[in-house]
Image (cartoon, helix red, strand yellow):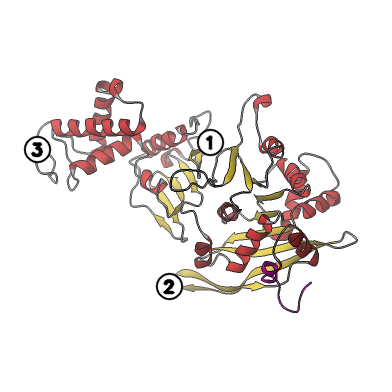
Amino acid sequence: MSRKAMFFQSKDTLSSFTEILRSVQEYISNKYAVLISDNPNEQKKQIKAYIAKFIRDYGYSIEGMTEQELVNKLYCEMAEFSFLTKYLFANDIEEININSYKDIKITYSDGRIIPTKEKFNSPGHAIDVIRRLLHQSGMILDNSQPVVRGHLSNKIRITVFGNGVIDPDKGIAVSIRIVNPRELKKEDFIKNKTATEEMLDFLSICLRYGVSNCITGATSSGKTTLMSWILSTVPKDKRIITIENGTREFDLVKEDEEGNVINNVIHTVTRYSEDEKQNIDQEKLLEFALTANPDVISVAEMKSAEAFAAQEAARTGHALTTTTHANSCEATYGRMVTLCKMRYDINDNTLYQLVTEAFPIVVFAKKLEDNTRKIMEITECVIHPKGKREVRTLYRYKVKENKIVDGKFVIAGEFEKVNNISESLQKRLLENGLPQDALKRFLKEGDNE
């Protein structure tokens, strides 16, 4: 029979992929479960071989599909994540948003949002596939727990809304975020017009020479991707400790061609337990990190009481980078104050003085209406001799025009260098080892203060 054959015309031939799938699933589970290897790669080969034998024996085929294509699709449905698999592991996709079983949108790294041609067969089919995804992180979706969060692997986060909080006929709603799928380099940020080379080098140098920063913005504004790149520029002999909440998104370990680790990185992640004594949160991880001789610490996101511990660590001289949610650089300090008060009821003004000292550099990132990501502003909080604080803009993106061209939103603007860093920050960077020639690059002539 030709590999491109039409449905085999026998009474046993099934008339749809769904029916073939159901029959293959029953065959595999009943006949070969005990033979499956513990080795994942070997297991995959065995299952595909069993599927191929079954469809040959019964003469099953799909019009326009080769035998191998049918085997791959059946395997994907049985052991992987249906048509989502190819999107989950692509290197140019940032988000998969499922609004219902038949409405799936893909957000690409270049900002395009495109609906998929594929759809789930039914609400139940969508639920089955997503349950498989959640199983990867030990999470269960059922009537008692209709909203869950989990992860598929490093860098892939999933949030699910199921029956009970959305309409049953929609099946399920899911947000899957893939952080920095292509490991963006400095050249990529420049090409995408996220920032200028000088802005990126400034952020890299500040962390390298002991000046802590906070990257702020809304969800999907590119905060984690930017922080991951900044951390990747830290010299190989400097020890980095990352602290992440629930799922690990960073992968900063570098190896040579022979597989030898050539940098100095420890990745840690929180562990939730119903037994409060066994619970390990970001604050506790930070406490232990400070005893592990770090040169640079990354607290992936400040959204609770760990903010107080983070600012304490930064004020003791550790270089620390973190992210939070706020709608401007200046508002970030107010956000930090609110978070710190979750730990201690300290006067707002006192906390403001602490967080501005801890994080002199704040970066505001934003996803604009045209789906591009920009570093909208970089500020320095200058502390004057009598303690007065001044939040000074160093760089900014200035929007000049918004317009719609051929039905698409277009934003015209440019990056501007507004002020030099303060003399006190210049002094701090020089004392921490920054060469004088490198510092000059970030100073506008005739404007040293």
Q: CA distance from mark 1 to mark 2?
A: 40 Å
Q: Position of residue 152 (x, y in %)?
A: 47, 39
Report the amino acid beneath label 3: Gln
Q: Badge 1 is on which residue?
A: 148
Q: Is residue 281 magenta?
A: no
Asked whether disc 1 touches disc 2, contact meaning CB atoms under 8 Å apart, the reply is no
> Which residue is under mark 2?
406
Q: N-terminal of the two: label 3 or label 2?
A: 3
Looking at the picture, how far across and down is residue 194, in whole percent?
55, 64
Query: What distance separates the C-alpha of mark 3 from that of mark 2?
Result: 50 Å
Earlier along the polypeptide chain: callout 1 or callout 2? 1
Q: Which residues are magenta?
A: 437-449
Q: CA distance from mark 1 to mark 3?
A: 46 Å
Q: Which is in the foreground here, disc 1 or disc 2?
A: 1
Quadrant where the C terminus is found in the figure: bottom right
Mark 3 lies on residue: 9
Label 3 neighbourhood size at 10 Å, few (<14), some (14-19), many (20+)? few
